[in-house]
């Protein structure tokens, strides 16, 4: 399998997440549950325990970035914020994004 195909495969969950955001953006709780469930399944399927730590780190850093962007600097806002000016599902997306970038980085390095 080529590197390009491997990177594309690792990008599919992100593309699927964009579709889910489009379909469920009006219900943050459902989107939050779906993103948590999908992230956990995708991490378990990959069988790399370090990815849970990366996922949690991404949630924390992503949440901080978004809260700073809405509450501190005010350069962005969301139509349906849940807490501290951001949707509850957004830090979860950051968390999985960190995991995806780790995976893609490994593919590109090999």
Image (cartoon, grey):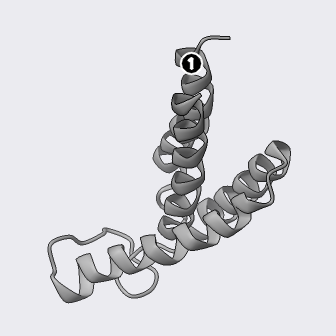
Q: Residue at x 55, y 26 (%)?
A: 7
The location of residue 105, given as percent across then percent down, is 52, 40
Q: Nearer the viewer, residue 110 or 38?
A: 110
Is residue 64 positioned above or below 36 on the image? below
Q: Secondary structure at mark 1?
A: helix
Please state the horizontal and vertical placement of residue 79, each as a whole percent of the image: 31, 68
Residue indicated by mark 1: 3
Q: Quadrant of the N terminus?
A: top right
Quarter of the image for the C terminus: give it. top right
Of residues 29 and 95, the one nearer the viewer is 95
Q: Residue at x 53, y 67 (%)?
A: 58
- Left or right of 76, for residue 15: right
Quarter of the image for residue 52 reads bottom right
Residue 35 left/right relative to 91:
right
Could you say which is closer to the camera, residue 38 or residue 82? 38
Query: Is 41 situated left or right of 33 in this image?
Result: right
Q: Is residue 77 left or right of residue 36?
A: left
- Which of 51/97 is in front? 51
- Find residue 47 and report its horizontal and vertical position in percent: 85, 48
- The image shows residue 27, relative to residue 75, as above or below, that is above
Report the residue at 21% width, 88% height from top.
72
Identified at 44% across, 86% down, the residue is 83
What is the total number of numbered labels drawn onto the structure image?
1
Q: Quadrant of residue 57?
A: bottom right
């Amino acid at each position: 399998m080529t590197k390009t195909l491997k990177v594309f495969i690792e990008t599919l969950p992100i593309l699927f997440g964009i579709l889910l955001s489009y379909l469920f953006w009006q219900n943050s709780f459902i989107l939050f549950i779906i993103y948590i469930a999908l992230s956990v399944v995708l991490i378990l399927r990959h069988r790399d325990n370090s990815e849970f730590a990366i996922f949690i780190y991404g949630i924390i850093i992503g949440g901080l970035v978004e809260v700073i962007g809405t509450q501190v600097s005010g350069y962005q806002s969301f139509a349906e914020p849940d807490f501290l000016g951001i949707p509850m599902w957004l830090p979860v997306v950051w968390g999985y994004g960190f995991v995806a970038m780790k995976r893609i980085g490994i593919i590109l390095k090999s």
